[in-house]
Amino acid sequence: MTATLTTSETSTRPMPKLWAKLPIRTGNIIQLSGIAAGAALLVAAAHLHTAGGVRVGLLAVGWLAIYLCSHAIAHVAVGRAVGIRFRAYGVRGTDHPENYPPGVRQLMSALPMWSALTDKDSMRQAKPWAKAAMFSAGETSTTIVSIASAAYAAHAGITGAHALLTGSVLWALAATITVAVVAKGDYTKAMRALGWRKPATPKTAKVSRERTTGPNRRGPRGNELRNAITGWTVVNVALVAVWAVNGAGFPWFAFVTVPSVVGVTSWARQGRREAAVR
């Protein structure tokens, strides 16, 4: 679930601010270089005869580089093929932080993700099928290349690659469902372009209840905390199980477990402080 693209269509919540804006040609060069560098790191991890920790590090960095650089460029490639023009690339965290649980929300908001900024006139003139193809390209590309990269690493016998492959499949499944449900999701936009979903409408009355990562963030309400604890318990138990089945080597699951525990705990404490104020 990387950053998607900014269009002229209205979404229910404002987009996070861009950290940087780059010309299309410059963005293409950087992203293609990132994909090439990530692939080179995976090949190096597969053929280097060195300590397992070094190979795991090369695997993690290489896979992440490919994951981050394969999304927005696919929007542009397919969009241009069907006649849609783009103004620039933007770099920021995820477009929809409110759809992530505590812990992962902060992580996804901090990762440098690419967004493709479309030309408004071009989008208005584009046919529905062209819009749908362009919207769908990003998440589809990310799913294919991230799983394929992990599958190559697993085939090459890199330490931890089978766990990465399992995690990539689970993450891709969760991402596909999310972007087909949330208003800002690529697949939701594609279905909306084809008339299969109703147009998004602003929900200004609920903006004040939005969870944020800043000083005005709110604590859990209703069953949100219970649902977050249940969801993250299932996720972490599954990760520990995968780690144990694959030989119980380096505890890589801690990279998910620790942020999720810290995030949920912080969220619960914020709720207690707000309750005390009320």
Image (tube, rainbow, N blue to C red):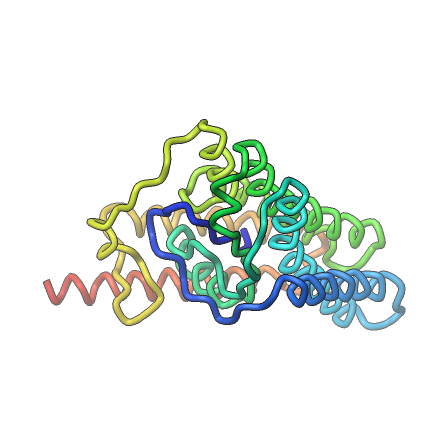
Front position in the image: 41 or 86: 86
Q: Residue at x 77, y 72 (%)?
A: 54
Instruction: Tally the marks.
Output: 0
Image quadrant assignment for residue 103? bottom left
* Residue 222 vertical placement versus 251 (above, below): above
Image coords of residue 159 (percent x, y): 77, 60
Query: Left or right of 234: which side holds 173?
Result: right
Image coords of residue 41 (percent x, y): 79, 66
Query: Left or right of 27: which side holds 115?
Result: left
Q: Do we see residue 65 in this rendering?
A: no
The residue sitting at the top extreme is 196
Q: Do we see residue 209 in this rendering?
A: yes
Front position in the image: 156 or 37: 37
Q: Residue at x 66, y 67 (%)?
A: 26
* Residue 37 vertical placement versus 233 (above, below): below
Front position in the image: 249 or 45: 45
Q: Residue at x 48, y 53 (%)?
A: 6
The residue sitting at the left extreme is 278
Image coords of residue 233 (percent x, y): 45, 50
The C terminus - image quarter:
bottom left
Image quadrant assignment for residue 33? bottom right
Image coords of residue 212 (percent x, y): 33, 62
Query: Left or right of 254: which side holds 265?
Result: left
Q: Residue at x 45, y 28 (%)?
A: 195
